[in-house]
Amino acid sequence: MTSQTIALVPTPHPTSNAVPSDPSLLDLESLARRALAESRRFYRHEDYDPRYAYELFRRALVEGDQAAWGQIFEQYTPLVEHWVRRTGAFTVSGETSDYFVSAAFTRFWRAIPPTRFSSFPTLASLLNYLRRCATCVVIDTARAQSFADVLPEESVNWNHQRLGHADEEATDRVSREEFWRLVDGLLASEAERVVVRCSYLLGMKPGDIFGQWGSLFGSVEEVYTLKRAILTRLRRSPELQGLY
């Protein structure tokens, strides 16, 4: 299955009249079965009707139907795992795909309370947002790992007050943004920015960096040397240590 197909415009197929025209009239079992059948048509590049899957999401997110949410998790886990594994930072994240699948779904339902559901008028808009959640949880974890790489463990204050989910997410986001703004200010050239970005956000090895950005470096050894020099400079930075 591929993520590119999500952008296709849904076209109801001729057999759609075989079931009630209003998916909300179906019981959950029938709705889930029809949503799965339509998804299979979609992946075969056939005309399909997205209303059944959309109604499944509506019941889960608006009505808080846990059984409907369970059906969504079961039907879309393979797709979310596919997105997770395609994210460049996955290989350096240190986590399993199962971990990220659960994290992506959690982020998704937390971000779409009943009052916000109307902002997603189509199945495609919901799936695109779910894909963003899958990508973000991988990248955020990889970035958090890069915090540990750049700053010695003893410089981090782990005795912070526990925050609620919303405040915690907002605080983490601001901290990440401030961290990378300060890092960028400590880098002296485009070559250094390429090394940091490719090493810690994309998980690329020095040989891969040199292969793609050879015009910026004289050799692979230069990439290694520059990376070590950057880490030494960042770890000694009072601005970065001041964040913690």
Image: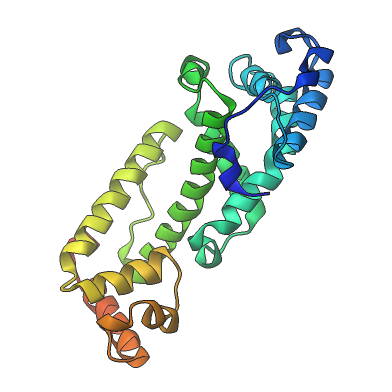
Q: Nearer the viewer, residue 200 or 37?
A: 37
How far across and how far down the image is residue 199, in percent? 39, 72
Relative to 105, is 188 on the left or the right?
left
Quarter holding residue 56: top right
How far across and how far down the image is residue 186, in percent? 17, 68
> In this orientation, does residue 200 appear?
yes
Residue drawn 33% across and 57% down?
157
Q: Nearer the viewer, residue 200 or 49?
A: 49
Quarter holding residue 71: top right
Relative to 97, is 145 on the left or the right?
left
Residue drawn 28% across and 82% down?
215
Q: Is residue 58 above or below residue 102?
A: above
Q: Nearer the viewer, residue 147 or 111?
A: 111
How far across and how far down the image is residue 78, in percent? 70, 47
Residue drawn 55% across and 23% down?
122
Q: Quadrant of the C terminus?
A: bottom left
Residue drawn 64% across and 52% down?
82
Quarter holding residue 190: bottom left
How far across and how far down the image is residue 189, in percent? 17, 73
Q: Nearer the viewer, residue 159 or 11?
A: 11
